[in-house]
Image: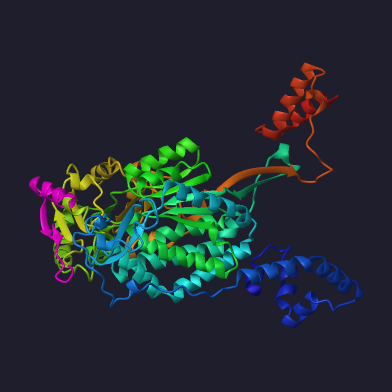
Amino acid sequence: MLETIDSLPAVLQPWLTWLSALTLGQIWKVLYNPPNKLNLTIAFLVISFKLPFYLRRYRTWRESRKVVEFLWPVPKEAAREWKGKIVDNPSLFSHLNDSTLLPPESGKTGGKREHITCYDPSTGYHLLTLPLLSASEVSDQVTKAQSAQKGWAKTTFAQRISFLRSLKAWVLRDIEDIVRVACRDTGKTEVDAVFGEILTTLSKLDWLIKHGEKTITPSARPGNLLLAHEISKVHYSPLGTVLALVSWNYSFHNLTSPILAALFAGNTIVVKCSEQVAWSSLWFIGGIKACLRACGLDEDVVQLVVCLPDVAETVTRNKLIKHITFIGSEPVGKKVALAAAEIMVPTCIELGGKDCAFILPETDLDFFSSTWMRGAFQSAGQNCIGIELFLVHRSQYSRFIEIMKPRVKALRPGIDVGSLISHAPIKKLETILASAEKSGARILAGGKAYVHPTYPQASYFEPTLVVDVNMNMAIAQEELFAPVMTVVPYDDIDEAIEWLNKSRYGLGAGVYGKNKGECRRAAERLECGMLIDWTLQGVFYLNQAMPFGGVKASGHGRFGGEEGLRSLCSVKSITEDRFFSYIRTSIPPPVDFPIPDPKKAWGFLVGLVNLAYARTLWGRAKGIDRLLKGLM
């Protein structure tokens, strides 16, 4: 220690020598001053002044930590051993060909009511034939949500966080029930459901619980010299009643995520679920409402709409709606955007994608092979951010095929890979694959519908590997949303990036390589909303602090993270006097109306500009001089 001190400037050496010689006891004695009447009085006054504040903080903290247990019974159809009536050629309208699928009360309630047939696409089992809402009934639901909004906006963050904690406890406790309900309605495997439904929803809950309040608490913004006496803050107020139109591929998460964000922001929400997953959506919404009731909150803040597209258009044009989130196809997304423009409300629109795995030369193919398998075949490829294209450098092309071909062939429909949501896309898939094959592509595995030996009415498609694809083929341009691994060879990195950027889509992408700098340079050049590592079906999406969304035909706006939560708020800028009643903003006499002397007014303003913004101190000093002259 002393050798170190000797190397320091002489003026510091005596002081540092004394400091280094102190014992811990001496340091404690110097710092600790035994209590006396004066410092005890000061401490008492400080504590008394702050005590009410800390008591309120403590009560709020305790309230936010409260977890309310509640029960929500699982439907019998979710049991693994349950067997239902097999629907021949199942579709949403199977009841029109088989009247035995209609509920007993059908036709006995007066006027004619439309229905949809709910069924399990992985077995063909009938779940429920559901009566649909009319336009007037949907309008009543929007009104009900709007009526509940004023009361909900008055709830505290502590109450909202307690609700989220209670919902999280339900998800953790009844994880198996939630997974089996989601699988029964979508045809996915239980493993895929845990990845895409449970992990993502728990991540959303955790982020809101830990960071939601800070995100939409009024935030101070920097001012400037001219407004040094003012405080500027941005406030985030609830919009009112918002609308979410969500897709079927993640029936629990896609339904729950916009509800959590909307309610935390102080809004009420109307959710229009996909008709394909109406059965599970009803149960999931029931669980959320049960949680609200158990927490002593108004269950009307969440409304579920089950209707056909013609009725859905009435809700997208309802003037009580203040924001629209849409997850789905591009044609429907355009209609939603048009409807939102008519009522002048903001939108967040997440559409399709043709997401790629851009594999650079010298990539460790063996290491990433499992990542790519899950990226392509998770949920039978029915993912917004699933890998649709694999661009592989020619130097590793043969080895890539050698690794992937046996792995794809080994996949078992119904065990490793779930079913498609319905039979509807199968014919188009087979047509696109046949066209690619005719143009020179090779199908090395799969390529056609799969007839399940136990469930022949199910809608499976064989896990497919198609290679030698070029970017001009339809299979490289159109979103497939299916278990198809499409492989494109390339020779030049720059050319491959140009190919990808010419795509009309721009949702996500992944870059894989050996050199981090090379990967980053390629990633920065790709035109998309997200750069993703697809391990565990998009590890990116497990971080709900990150905004989710795309560019070009993949949509606009973001949900998730600070950007998503704040987009559900009315952003209000508030500027107020820092020392209210003492220093206030006033109009200086030289520029007060009527202007007493235009020449002095000009000089005063030039001086003001230079005082605030001149590039040098001398320029600012001259600004003060002109300012003072203008005041004389």
Q: Nearer the viewer, residue 256 or 584?
A: 256
Residue 327 in the magenta stretch? The answer is no
Please determine whether, in this image, residue 334 is positioned above or below residue 287.
Answer: above
Residue 450 in the magenta stretch? The answer is yes
Quadrant in which the C terminus appears: top right
Residue drawn at 62 percent across, 52 percent down: 150
Spot the residue most to the bottom.
25
Q: Nearer the viewer, residue 142 or 370?
A: 142
Task: Tell me which corner region of the image, top left, top right, bottom left or bottom right, holds residue 182.
Answer: bottom left
Quadrant in which the N terminus appears: bottom right
Residue drawn at 78 percent across, 69 percent down: 51
Task: Tell me which corner region of the image, top left, top right, bottom left or bottom right, holds residue 186.
Answer: bottom left
- Report the side of 53 relative to 330 (left or right): right
Please determine whether, in this image, residue 17 is positioned above or below residue 521.
Answer: below
x and y percentages locating residue 484 in the rendered image: 20, 57
* Magenta part of the chain: 428-455
x and y percentages locating residue 272 in the rendered image: 42, 53
Please determine whether, in this image, residue 440 is positioned above or below residue 465.
Answer: above
- Report the side of 313 relative to 41 (left or right): left
Figure disc tally: 0
Q: How is colour applied across the structure in the image?
A: rainbow
- Report the side of 23 relative to 529 (left or right): right
Residue drawn at 75 percent across, 82 percent down: 25
- Quick check: can you spot residue 372? no
x and y percentages locating residue 584 in the rendered image: 80, 39
x and y percentages locating residue 178 in the rendered image: 39, 70
- Quick check: can you spot residue 387? yes
Q: Nearer the viewer, residue 335 or 81?
A: 81
Spot the residue most to the right.
37
